[in-house]
Image (cartoon, rainbow, N blue to C red):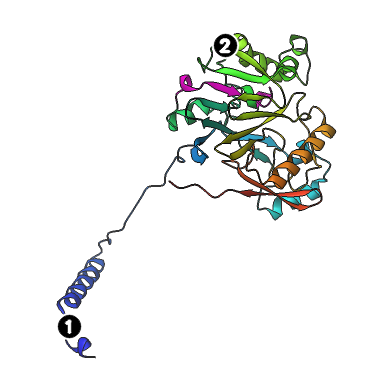
Amino acid sequence: MIDDLNPTRRNLLIGAAALASASGLAAGTSPALARAPFARTQPAYFYRFPLGKAQVTMVSDGTLALGKPSDTMKGMSEAEIAQALTDNFLPTDSVVLEQNIAIVNMGNRLIMFDSGMGFSKAFGTTTGRLMRSLGEARIRPEQIDDIIITHAHIDHIGGLATERGRRLFPNATIHISKVDHDFWTDEAKLSDRTLGLFVRHARANLLPYRDRIKWVTGGQEVVPGVQAVNAPGHSVGHTIYLIESDGKKLAFTGDVTHHQILLTERPRTEFAYDSDPKQAVDTRLRVFDMLSKDRIPMLAFHFPWPGHGYLGRTGPETFRFFPAPMAIG
């Protein structure tokens, strides 16, 4: 009460400021406002986290639009697809996938897994930003020692070379399954209506490295700390990789699954771009069982950025993806 009757210097100053403000408003002037323009760009498209004594940098080749969900997801009705997407706050009119490319620094070598769409715009104009993402992460293409490929589909080998056939990674060795390489670079398939586009793009990106390719076999240590695991079905020689450093493991799962809901919570859903849909489902269930049982974290190429997380079993043949918390520092 005493303070109310005896104003301090601070209270007098506050009162004077309020009076001045009111006077200004009365005179028709505008008050000062804190302003910031709307940002027109997103932050840099890379993310880093540790793996034992190694460091993983995720970079993006941009988002890839597949269009109407029922065109690519088979075995679920349109109503079931729409309900699953709605329940997870996702749009029902189009499936949009990420392209999460992993670069693992083992200390003595720099290893990149897959490469995105590159110069092809077959799935829209938002792809093809790998080189920009590498620049944002301050990784130079000539620093990459090895590029390990899950399979030779257009969105996994597309960032290796320019449209004119110049290698973008001049010092890199390419590691890929021979059966997958041979299938997708087969000149006889160029005239095929369905496969032609994929074959042209695979030839444009893989043939410039023909003298720098090493064949991958399931169970083999591709380079120190990286083991190949056969995972056919999506493609004839589709391969996933277990990465290990100082006892810590991480699985780069390629296209075992494309969608964190439609092909993960319902893994028997088939995908239109699978070479052998039934085999792809069997592989998916086998890999999911391994990842969930052994609690191995995964890097999913097409999951929401950056695709790093865990699979938990929710039923005999159902799973859920749990994104890993962001690593700080």
Labels 2 & 1 near each other (Cβ < 8 A): no
User: Residue 208, how many percent across, how many down?
Assistant: 59, 10
User: Residue 306, how many percent across, how many down?
Assistant: 56, 41
Q: Specify few, some or many for label 2: CA neighbours under 10 Å numbering under 14, 14-19, or 20 or more.
A: some
Drawn side of residue 241 relative to residue 69, left or right: left
The answer to whether residue 121 shows anywhere in this view is no
**Residue toward you, 99 or 223:** 223
Seen as rendered, the residue at the extreme left is 9
- Residue bearing mark 2: 165
Residue 263 location, quadrant: top right
Vertically, is 193 above or below 57?
above
Q: Specify few, some or many for label 1: CA neighbours under 10 Å numbering under 14, 14-19, or 20 or more.
A: few
Q: Secondary structure at mark 1?
A: loop
Sequence-wise, which precedes: disc 2 or disc 1?
Answer: 1
Q: What residue is at 74 percent from the left and 9 percent from the top?
A: 187
Kindly identify the amino acid type of the residue bearing the numbered disc 1: Pro
Question: What are the residue bounds of the magenta stretch?
Answer: 140-155
Q: What residue is at 78 percent from the left and 21 percent from the top?
A: 194
Measured in 3D between alpha carbons, the distance from the residue under mark 2 to the one under mark 1, in whole angstroms, is 80 Å
Q: What residue is at 50 percent from the left and 35 percent from the top?
A: 54
Q: Which mark is residue 7?
A: 1
**Residue toward you, 317 or 220:** 220
**Residue toward you, 162 or 31:** 162
